[in-house]
Image (cartoon, helix red, strand yellow):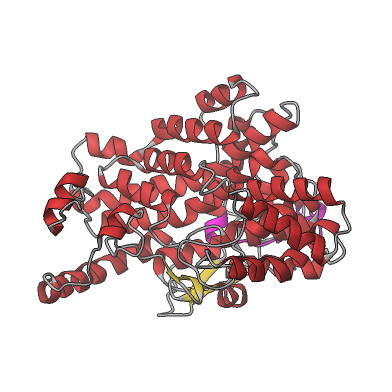
Amino acid sequence: MTLLAAGTRAAARLRGPKNPPCVLFAARRASAATNLKDVLASMIPKEQAKIKSFRQQHGSTAIGQITVDMVYGGMRGMKGLIYETSVLDPDEGIRFRGYSIPECQKLLPKAAGGEEPLPEGLFWLLVTGEVPTQEQVPRRGHPGDRRCRCRCRRLSPASPLQVTWVSREWARRAALPSHVVTMLDNFPTNLHPMSQLSAAVTALNSESKFARAYAEGIHRAKYWEFVYEDAMDLIAKLPCVAAKIYRNLYREGSGIGAIDPNLDWSHNFANMLGYSEPQFIELMRLYLTIHSDHEGGNVSAHTSHLVGSALSDPYLAFAAAMNGLAGPLHGLANQEVLLWLTDLQKELGKEVSDEKLREFIWNTLNSGRVVPGYGHAVLRKTDPRYSCQREFALKHLPQDPLFKLVAQLYKIVPNVLLEQGKAKNPWPNVDAHSGVLLQYYGLTEMNYYTVLFGVSRALGVLSQLIWSRALGFPLERPKSMSTKGLMQLVGYKAG
C-alpha cells in the first residue's frame, strides 16, 4: 500500500460514524468546544481588542535601551519581538503559556497507560492558552466487549484506544501528495536529513490553503483561518515526511506503513520509524513536547516569524526555520554532544575517574573549544528540559554507561566552567541529554536527530504563526546601520 493510499484510507475511516472524537475541556475558562478552530474564533476578537486598547494607551512607552554591544552581539537581550506562546525565564527556564515543564508534565493529558504528556495537549495549550483535559468517549466496541469486531482487540495493551480530537484531526490530514513522496525517494543518500526535510516541506507548499486563498484575494481578517489550516496540515504530515527520510536513509527504503487513527501523534511517528517499544514511544511523547518551543528569539522561531511576516505561507516559513535549525549553533548541538562524548570514551575508556574527566574537560577548553551541551544564551540555571530527560533516564535506564557518563559530567563540568570564569551559564542545556536517550533505544543515527527536533519545533512556531496573522502583525523590517553610521551616532572619535 502506498503512503498516499494509506493516508486516504485512514482519512476515510476517520470520517466514519463509528469514530466520534474525544472531548477536550480547558482548565482555564473551561470550554465544551472540541474544534480548535472554533475555540480560536471565539478568542481572537477579544485578544485583538485587548491589544488595540493596550497600544492606544502605551504605544509610545519606552521599554528599554539599546546598546552598541547589543547591536554587535546578536541582539542579545534586546526586546523587539512579540511572541505569545512561550517565554524563557533566565532562572526558571521555559514556560509554555505560563506553565513550566514540570507543571505541563503534571497537567497535560497522557495516553492511556502512559506517564508523559501528549504533544497534542501542548499544542492546544500553545494555541489557546488553556490546559486541555481528556474526557474519553467510549467507542462502539472495545476490548472486552464481545460485540467488538474492530482491530482494537489486536492493539498493544499500552496503546491508547481513545485519543484526543487533535490526534484524530492530524491523522485525518496526514497523507502526503505523491510528488513529495517521489521527491523523497529520489534524493541521494548523501543529502543530509535536514536538507531533505526542508526541501520536502517547501514542496508541500503545493498544498497551501493560505497561498491559494491569498491569490484569490481573501480579506486580511481571514488570514489566520487559512494559516491555521496549513499549520494543522503541516504538523499532521511532518511525521510521515520525517519517517520517510529515516526509512530511505537507514532502513533500505522500507515502507512506513499507514497512519492508525486510534493512536496518538507520537505513537504513530514511532511506529513509522520502526520503533514499537512502549518506553521509546513514551520518550517520543516527552521529546516532542519539550523541544516544541523556546521563546521567539531563537533562530528557528525568529526565522519562521520573519518569513511569515512577508505573508509567505506556513510551509515556506517553516522550511526557512528548518534551515536555521540545521545550524551547528542551534539544532545540531545534540549531535555535537554525542561526538564529544564518543571522543571522550575513545581516549579515556568507558570507566573514567573524576580526575581524568576534569583533565579532559580542561584540555577541551584550553584547545579553544567549548564543552558541547553546556551554557545557553538566556538561561542561567540548569535547563529544565535537561532535568526532565535526566529524570526519565533515572527511571528507565539508570545503569546505561552513556547516561552514567552524562550524569558524571553534570557533577564536574559546571565547576570547571566556573573556575575558567568565561561562561555566563555553566549549566547543561537540553542538548546535553537528548542524544543519549535516543542512543539507548537504538536510534543511533546522529545526523537524523535534528529532524526529530524539527518535527517538535513545528508545534511552537506554527502556533505563533496563527496568532501573528490573527493579530495582524506587519512585515518585520528593523533598521540596520553601518559601523561608520553607528560611530557617528554615538560620537565616537578614533584615538
Residue 398 location in percent, x, y? 84, 67
Residue 363 location in percent, x, y? 69, 53
Residue 443 location in percent, x, y? 75, 45
Seen at 51% across and 62% down, the residue is 376
> What's the magenta bit mostly, secondary-structure-wise?
loop
Which one is in front, 455 or 366? 366
Q: Does the magenta stretch include residue 160?
A: yes
Residue 356 location in percent, x, y? 81, 60
**Boundaries of the magenta span:** 152-167
Count of marks placed on residues: 0
Relative to 149, is 16 on the left or the right?
left
Seen at 75% across and 42% down, the residue is 274
Residue 110 visible within the image: no
Seen at 82% across and 47% down, the residue is 347
- Give the image quarter of residue 445: top right
- Give the image quarter of residue 1: top right
Q: Is residue 38 magenta?
A: no
Relative to 466, is 322 on the left or the right?
right
Seen at 32% across and 47% down, the residue is 226
